[in-house]
Image (cartoon, rainbow, N blue to C red):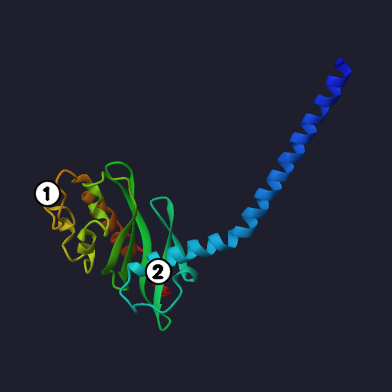
Amino acid sequence: MGFASIREKLGYQPVLLGVFALLASGALAWVSESTAGAIAAAEAKDLRDSLAEVLPQGFADNDFLHDTVDLENKGKTVTIYRARQGGVVKGAIFKVAERGYAADIVILMAVDADGKMLGARVLKHAETPGLGDKIELSKAPWIKDFDGKSLGNPAPEKWAVKKDGGVFDQFAGATITPRAVVKAVKGGLDFYAAHRKEILGDKS
């Protein structure tokens, strides 16, 4: 086989590779576009279910996902989902976060119009299994201790774990984790109090 013949055959390879690459990228783009709607709908449902989980049943009758306000908190944008009943804002749901033992602990919390806790759930964490993961409702009821709490109940200095003189239980061998959650929720209540009128839509 001569050099010219080999060179001629080799010349087709980049072309074929280019064609296959083009076909593959086109197929991927088609799959992505055709499934984007279903993925977005599933994500919206998951978010809506999470938001509803921190509210008492029947507390609101609006679609939280389409009733939001964005505010700044510590240099970051926080999306507040407003819960309405009969068109009146009865509460707010938003995320807060604090550094735990291993990484940030992300919490979804809900408060009523007066700033009283309606519920809190941990959305994301990397705490030690069997120790710090008791912040998950599926592992322990500890997170429910925030229900009904406010900036005045308990007193500000009591917003801490019992080891630090507060009212919230800590976990054996994992005090850092509940301490971070308490700090995050207390910070969320402070944030709500500072922006209450904006969140409720009070123009006065």
Quarter holding the N terminus? top right
In the rendered image of this protein, does residue 55 appear above or below residue 139? below
| Label 2 crowd (10 A; few <14 / some 14-19 / many >=20) | many
Q: Secondary structure at mark 1?
A: helix
What amino acid is found at the position of numbered circle 2 in the picture? Ile
Q: Which residue is mark 2?
A: 199
- Percent from the top left, x then y, of residue 60? 38, 77
What's the residue at 22%, 64% (across, down)? 144
What's the residue at 38%, 62% (across, down)? 94
What amino acid is found at the position of numbered circle 1 in the picture? Lys
Asked whether, in this view, residue 102 is left or right of residue 145, the answer is right
- The image quarter in which residue 185 lies: bottom left
What's the residue at 26%, 58% (across, down)? 186
In the rendered image of this protein, does residue 117 appear above or below residue 99? below
Q: Secondary structure at mark 2?
A: helix
- Percent from the top left, x then y, of residue 91? 35, 72
Furthest toward the top, the residue is 2
Q: Which residue is mark 1?
A: 163
